Amino acid sequence: MKNKILTSVIITVLFALLIVASSFITIINLEQIKNTKEQLRNINLLVSELNDVTDISRNDYEELKALNNTKINGIDVRFTLINDNGVVLYDNEQKSSENHRDREEVKKAMETGEGYSKRYSETIKSDLIYYATRLNNNFVIRSSVSINSVTIILKENIKYCFGILLVVMPFSLFLSLRLVKKIIDPVKELESVTLKMTHGDYKIRANINTNDELGTLGNSFNNMAEQLQIKIREVIDNQNKIESILKSMESGVIAVDNCNMVISINPCAESLLGIKKNIVGECLLDHIKDYDIIRFLEQDDVNDKEIKIRHPMERDFKIKKSAMVDGMEGVGKVITFQDITDINRVELMRSQFVANVSHELKTPLTSIKGFAETLKFVKDDETREKFLDIIDKEAERLSRLINDILVLSNIESNLAVDMHEFEPGSVIEEVINIMRKTAINKNIKLEFKDNSNEKIFGDRDKFHQLALNLIENAIKYSKDTSGKVEVLSYNEDKYYCLRVKDNGLGIPKEDISRIFERFYRVDKSRKKGGTGLGLAIVKHIVKIFNGEIYVKSELGVGTCFEVKIPYL
Ligand code: ADP
């Protein structure tokens, strides 16, 4: 660019100088011819004064000859005297015998008094400048000089001209270079700023401080950069917002183009599909192992479906796909994955719970119904007594079951939570008092140690239920006579702790993880009349108190439950 401008500027300058020089030479040439003409005219005037020219009788032309040494610019002037018939009477160089009447300058002089011409002389064999003047006696005196008289001057002038050119040329080159630099520097500045902007530096601005078009261009460029920076910041902000929304979503979202190339994928979708690397720009189908999902993505007529996948883990998905449209044109699709495993599990648990409840209620009811019907036909008092006793026990079990179901449902639905501060030790004391009689009946030693000295905040009745269930279980699953139940209430760091320890039956290892499930009983043959809901209730209450429950147990040795509740 710089070289191109420089070359064209130099060519233009040289061309201009050449035109100026040639115009200068032409003007000098014309001026010189004019001068020569003037000089010849003056010489003619001088000659017209001579006696031997005006007097025809004198034909020695002595006076005229005396002018032989007349020179213009060092070149001899030729004199020709021509009579009114065009006959050459005198020529100081070479007298021509030809009639000169038709010579251009002579003809003009005869007609108008003066004539001029510049032409080639066959007589002298060179280019001459002629000037003819008509005398009073109608003769014509013509003086002429070789064109060399002009060119000699011209040659001298050309020397000056070249001299001037030599001085002007470096000066104009210097000016051209400065001009080019003035044009190129802002362009270079714009070029480097543009390059930096393409590499992501949108803060950079062009530094062009001129008051010309390039300065205006620089200002417009900076304004454009400012707008671009604002727009890009807006785009990045929007993108960040969308990305953080997508990141925080608990549903998987994937956007793909028409060729199933991934445009965007959120972390939830990656973890649901077990994708461990960035797959943006890659084909989604290459990274999905589940055949059902691949088929769903390829089907155009199905837009949502429930799918069960086995990789990376067994999960239930609700998949939806919708078209991404830009104007009227479809540019891809957005696929959303909703993990409905928990919803399905809850649904399953609900139906199982209903089945379990029905089953659990049915067992004592069937028994009550059976014994009641048989009772009608039993006459023997002892058997009647026995049957009535069974009916009473089953009815009590039924009532316990219904009571536990109601407590559990109340806890699960979080109804009417009565929150206030209370001393956990006093609540446990109440429970111990309730259970003491049962323990004495079973000959079980029931010990309570209260080391807690801080109140806890929450629902006192629920805490009562929690302690009751744990202590009741400890007594229930203790060996008669040699049993011992230790209840300890204490503080540890920021936690209130309740420990209920017994030396009873213990829980088999494989059952420990399941004892908190509803209706789960370790060994139905234990026949302790439990409902299987006690620990499920405990687990829910602990959750309400934001606490944790731990269990350690060894079959035949004993069990220890520990509840930890954080102080607020
Ligand atoms: P249940 O009404 O049958 O006692 P729970 O939910 O309270 O129901 O307990 C679930 C199962 O855990 C019981 O069937 C029992 O076998 C076992 N279990 C609970 N507490 C103890 C304990 N202290 N010692 C031994 N086994 C226990």
Image (cartoon, rainbow, N blue to C red):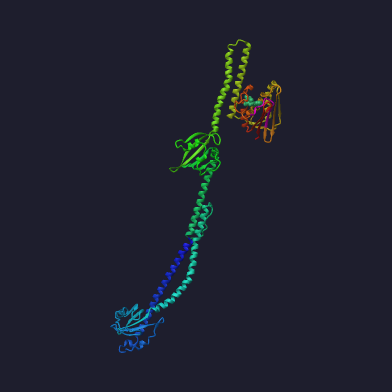
Instruction: Depth check: give the residue in front, 231 or 239.
Output: 239
Q: In which quarter of the image is the C terminus?
A: top right
Residue 453 sits inside the magenta stretch: no
- The mark tally for this picture is 0
Seen in the picture, residue 97 relative to 382 is either above or below; the reply is: below
- What x and y, as percent, mark residue 520? 60, 26
Looking at the image, residue 147 sits to the left or right of residue 295; the answer is: left
Quadrant in which ligand 1 is drawn: top right
As drawn, is 489 to the left or to the right of 192?
right
Q: Which residue is drawn at 48% across and 58% down?
A: 216
Residue 451 in the image, given as x and y percentages of width and height: 71, 31
Task: Please indicate, yes or no, whether residue 210 appears anywhere in the rendered image.
Answer: no
Indicate whether residue 500 is drawn in magenta: yes
Q: Nearer the viewer, residue 449 or 504?
A: 504
* Residue at (63% x, 22% y) in the render: 525
Q: Which residue is drawn at 69% across and 34% down?
A: 492
Residue 522 relative to residue 168: left or right: right
Residue that extends furthest to the left in the rendered view of this protein? 85
Horizontal arrangement in the rendering, residue 479 relative to residue 56 (left or right): right
The answer to whether any part of residue 16 appears in the image is yes
The front one of 560 and 554 is 554
Q: Where is residue 121 in the image (x, y as percent from the top left)?
A: 34, 79
Q: What stretch is highlighted in magenta?
A: 497-509
Q: Is residue 129 above or below residue 463?
A: below
Q: In this view, does 280 lie above or below 42?
A: above
- Above or below: residue 272 compared with residue 58: above
Give x and y (percent) for residue 71: 40, 83
Q: Residue furthest top?
A: 379
Q: Quadrant of residue 556?
A: top right
Q: Looking at this view, is 439 or 144 the one in front?
A: 144
